Amino acid sequence: MVSRRKLLSSASMLALIPVANLIPTTVFAATNVDLSNASAVALKYVENATDAQRTDKMGTAGADQVCDNCRFYTVDAGNSARGGCVLFQNQLVAGKGWCAGWVPTA
């Protein structure tokens, strides 16, 4: 038989599930992408886009391709020079960086 205390405890935990997505992700410390990371190597990620050999892609000149104007990039609230990238599991990348996965914003 379940005690009332255990029942109320379980119910209160279940009630928090819908609001769990409202917790800001900035509470958790994001880390910078390690340049030796397998994903970074495969996508040819560089911290400074001028160091990359970029070709014209999707109607955008290679020189204009940076993380700042990529669809997968989101600006970090606490650091305007870096932001999260979906391709790197939301680890922080340089806004002036580049990788082969670059896609223009919509």
Image: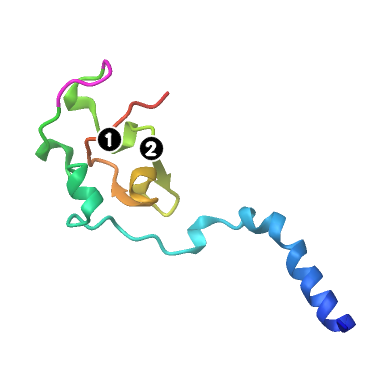
The residue pinned by badge 1 equals: 101
On the question of residue 52 being in view, the answer is: yes
- Looking at the rendered image, the disc whose residue lies closer to the viewer, 1 or 2, is 1
The residue pinned by badge 2 equals: 72
Q: Label 2 sits on what residue type?
A: Phe
Q: Position of residue 88 (x, y in %)?
A: 33, 49
Question: Relative to 81, is 15 on the left or the right?
Answer: right
User: SS of the residue at dot 2?
Assistant: loop
Q: Residue at x 34, y 26 (%)?
A: 104
Q: Which residues are magenta?
A: 55-59
Q: Are marks 1 and 2 in contact (CB under 8 Å)?
A: yes
- Mark 2 closeness class: few <14, some 14–19, many ≥20 residues within 10 Å: some
Q: Quadrant of residue 71?
A: top left
The relative height of residue 89 versus residue 16 in the rendered view (above or below) is: above
Q: Quadrant of residue 101?
A: top left
The N terminus, quarter of image: bottom right
Nearest to N terminus: mark 1 or mark 2? 2
- Mark 1 closeness class: few <14, some 14–19, many ≥20 residues within 10 Å: some
Give whichever of 60, 101 is nearer the camera.
Answer: 101
The relative height of residue 19 versus residue 69 in the rendered view (above or below) is: below
On the question of residue 47 being in view, the answer is: no
Give whichever of 93, 34 is nearer the camera.
Answer: 34
Q: In terms of secondary structure, what is the magenta stretch mainly?
A: loop
Magenta stretch holds residue 57 = yes
Q: Quadrant of residue 99?
A: top left
Q: Position of residue 25 (x, y in %)?
A: 51, 56
